[in-house]
Image (cartoon, rainbow, N blue to C red):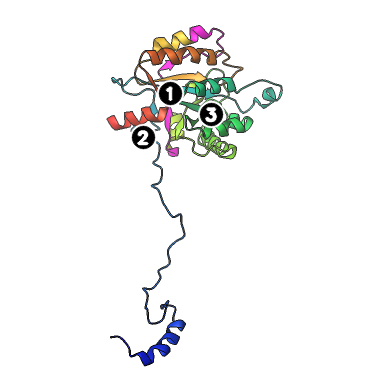
Amino acid sequence: MIPPVRHLAALCALGAALTSLTGCGTPQEPRVARPAGPAHVSNPPSRPPTLAPGPAGLTPVFSSAPRTADKTVALTFDADMTADQGARAAAGEHFDNPGLIAALRALKVPATVFMTGRWAEEYPEQARSLGRDPRFEIANHSYSHYAFTDDCYGLPTVPEDRMRADVERAYTAFRKAGVPDAMPYFRFPGGCYDRRALRAVSGLGVTAVQWDVVSGDAFATDADAVARQVLDGVRPGSVVVMHCTRSAAPTTERAVRTVVPELRRQGYRFVKVSELIGAASRRR
């Protein structure tokens, strides 16, 4: 019911005193407090694909995608540096390979870099640059690059009760270097693992990533031989292991400059490991 005009002034005075009124005689709905936030909220990013745990909850292992008509291949590069090689780096030994990364960018090749935490500490600017470049994804290669099994290419061995901590320490090093979103993928140093190692890292929720094509670039001096070995081995869904260390793999950049155009000529498409794992997960 509309009030008489003579009561309007009194009602206005009353309305000014009430927080639920914003003007003379005009009641408003109560204001409900809402949490502060951005004007537009997008969907949260989806978690990178991983494989389901193996028997008894062991860490799953991925080596290649199913062989299908989709000619995809993932080039992976191990950025190796062990925990005890700091003095060698200080003396001038190069465990990085900027020329290789520049070649991948120039060739527009996506790739997955399996990085040790010690490497990220030694080369934080490069780690950050790779981690923020959408063409690359950073995965875990342990902190120390010490072996998770006995008798693995002469590498020192991580005690079983320190294996998980070694992987976690690498992720911490990535964050400190400015890598925003390292992937939940782990490559055992030297590719050496056993049931004990798979059990030790099973609580981390990672997928262990191996390979089905060995490039042979470690300590190689003949880039053409490395390229031939890759080209002879690649099949649809392959994972190729190479290295991102000038001192230990000096021919890798030249081999890549041969491999990439030839595989493209054969109809292959380069992808990151996450795409291959996603394809494998969908087929299970």
At which x and y percent is residue 276? 37, 27
User: In the displayed structure, would residue 221 be above or below residue 140?
Assistant: above
User: Which amino acid type is marked by label 1?
Assistant: Gln
Q: Residue at x 47, y 60 (%)?
A: 36
Q: Which mark is residue 210?
A: 1
The residue wearing badge 2 is 53
Q: Which mark is residue 83?
A: none
Any part of residue 231 in sight: yes
Is residue 113 or residue 151 the one in the foreground? 113
Q: CA distance from mark 2 to mark 3?
A: 23 Å
User: Which amino acid type is marked by label 3?
Assistant: Met
Question: Within 10 Å of the Cα at label 3, are there few (<14), some (14-19), or many (20+) other Cα atoms?
Answer: many
At which x and y percent is residue 251? 55, 12
Is residue 110 or residue 6 the one in the foreground? 6
Closer to viewer: mark 2 or mark 1? 1
Q: Which mark is residue 115?
A: 3
Residue 209 lies in the magenta-colored region: yes
Question: Within 10 Å of the Cα at label 2, are there few (<14), some (14-19), or many (20+) other Cα atoms?
Answer: some
Q: Residue at x 32, y 32 (%)?
A: 281
Q: Mark 2 or mark 1: name the one nearer the start of the chain.
A: 2
The secondary structure type at the circle numbered 1 is loop
Q: Is residue 171 left or right of residue 2?
A: right
At which x and y percent is residue 174? 55, 36
Q: Is residue 208 left or right of residue 180?
A: left
User: In the displayed structure, would residue 20 be above or below residue 96?
Assistant: below
Residue 37 lies in the magenta-colored region: no
Closer to viewer: mark 2 or mark 3? 3
Closer to viewer: mark 3 or mark 1? 3
The secondary structure type at the circle numbered 3 is strand
Is residue 157 or residue 220 the one in the foreground? 220
The magenta stretch is 203-226
Q: CA distance from mark 3 to mark 1?
A: 14 Å
